[in-house]
Image: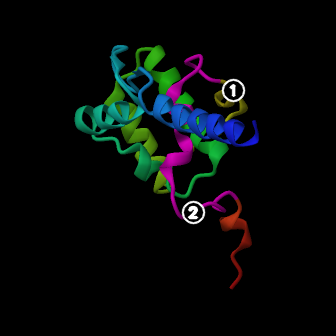
Amino acid sequence: FGSMGDQDEERWSDWEEDDSDQLPTLSLFGPPKTLPSPAACLRHAQDEYGFDLVSAAQGLGLYERIQLINYIRAASARGEDGKAVVVRIDEALVGAGARLWKEDAYLQPVVEGDPLLFSLGGFDDDDDDDDDNEDDEED
């Protein structure tokens, strides 16, 4: 039974990874559009609105990434123009504007069970400790 349990656990792990990659995901901007996966959602944001979430999320901690996605989703739900939201985000990320998404309210999912939030771990491969880097710098 011991080896069978290990095999079952391995199959479960494979299924979880495959399943999360293919969950229908609501578009980030514009009128709600269901896309086949989180990756398709990211491509749609890049192709239609010029917004690269993976690049925008670099240097942000996990909680701020969650807040950013929920901020975008809330703005879309309010009917805000996607390109205007992108401009606000870009300005904030280069220090020219306030990071409006850094509110506790945006820690709550706007889309229940949002597959994009579950795919956040795939955004960064080499910056695991990005949450506290800016506070640790010394001259």
User: In this figure, which residue is indicated by the disc labeled 1?
Assistant: 105
Q: Which of the two marks, 2 or 1, is nearer to us in this view?
A: 2
**Quadrant position of the C terminus in the picture:** bottom right
Amino acid at pointer 1: Ala
- Secondary structure, mark 2, is loop
User: In this figure, which residue is indicated by the disc labeled 2?
Assistant: 127
Residue 7 % position (x, y): 62, 39
Q: Residue at x 43, y 20 (%)?
A: 76
Q: Residue at x 39, y 28 (%)?
A: 37
Residue 30 % position (x, y): 34, 20
Residue 23 % position (x, y): 45, 23
* Residue 68 is at least partly visible in this image: yes
Q: Residue at x 57, y 63 (%)?
A: 127
The magenta-colored residue range is 109-131
Q: Is residue 46 left or right of residue 60?
A: left
**Residue 128, magenta (yes or no):** yes
